[in-house]
Amino acid sequence: MTDKSYCVRFLPHVEGGLFQGLADQIRELYGCRSLVAQLYRYRLKERYHGSGLGLLWTLVNPLLMMAGLALIFPLLIRVSMADYILYLFAGITTWGLISGAVAGGGESVLSNAGLIRRIYVPRQVFPFVTVLIEITNLAVALIALHLIGVLFGLHISTKLSYLVAAIFVTGFFVIGVAYIFSILVVYFRDLKHIMGVGLQAIFYVTPIIYPVTMLPENAQAIMEWNPFFQFVRLFQLAIHSPAAADWSFFAIPGLIAAAVLLAGMLMQWRFGRVLIYRL
């Protein structure tokens, strides 16, 4: 993993300006594509190392979780919605991607401090790999979701192209989020403890376990300002909604994803090289 063939040493030109910095970010990450692939395989195996089922837990774990939710949540929350379980699953799987990118991406640089001190590795590699792992978990969870739908006789009308587009847009968003928090956590260590509480609060104020239509009209209007709801709704529309695909819902999430990714890349470019002095 430390061999030079896995990652071309390329130091970005901090003084080169905005466009030079963004180009350097892309070139550096592409130059380390073999390292990214190796770290991805290692982290995925590490998560289930020593378990009897090994990597099969990536499918069994969400399958069991969703089966439990399917049995418990309808008893706790009375929602007059067709296939409410499908709506619930769509939101929870999306939230798993977002929260995993925030929490895991935020700690990704600190948790690899030993490797960073020994050799030069572009700092954005670690949050990027974290997001790849979370996207893999999302894909497996979506498979489990459809299996549960078949078992419970739910009317699944997944719009595949809409779902794929939602994964891409949300993926760019969470990469930017992971980039930002991987820098902030190094400078403000208490932030990693605050993130858990913050994510839990955001989960409950985002229409995931309840439909947005349950809220008063003024609250529904305010919810449009919740950036996380913008992405969760894409998956709910792709999986749960029987209506035809409305691509206009991608406008705001697309702008948010572009802005957050740009901010994350700029932070990595500006602070990535000096993080070593904070570790």
Image: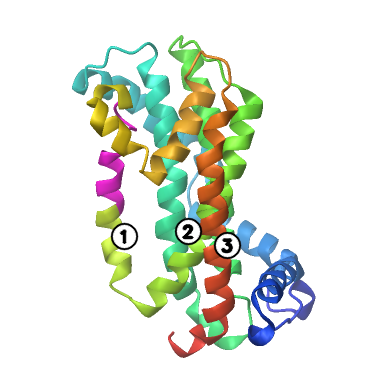
Q: Residues within 10 Å of mark 3 (few under 14, many from 20)?
A: some
Contact flag, marks 1 and 2 (Cβ < 8 Å):
no
Mark 1, secondary structure of its residue? helix
Mark 3, secondary structure of its residue? helix
- Above-or-below relation of 63 to 177: above
The amino acid type found where label 2 is placed reads Val
The amino acid type found where label 3 is placed reads Leu
The residue labelled by disc 1 is 195
Instruction: Using the numbered discs, state the Cα–Cα distance from disc 1 to disc 2 in whole angstroms.
Output: 12 Å
Position of 265 with respect to 11 (left or right) is left
The amino acid type found where label 1 is placed reads Met
Instruction: Using the numbered discs, state the Cα–Cα distance from disc 3 to disc 1 in whole angstroms.
Output: 22 Å
The residue labelled by disc 3 is 262
Q: Residues within 10 Å of mark 1 (few under 14, many from 20)?
A: some
Q: Residue at x 36, y 18 (%)?
A: 84
Question: Looking at the image, is mark 1 or mark 2 nearer the viewer?
Answer: 2
Residue 80 rendering spot, x and y as whole percentages: 28, 12
Magenta stretch bounds = 199-210
Does the segment drawn in magenta span residue 18? no
Question: Where, quadrant-wise, is the N terminus in this rendering?
Answer: bottom right
The residue labelled by disc 2 is 177
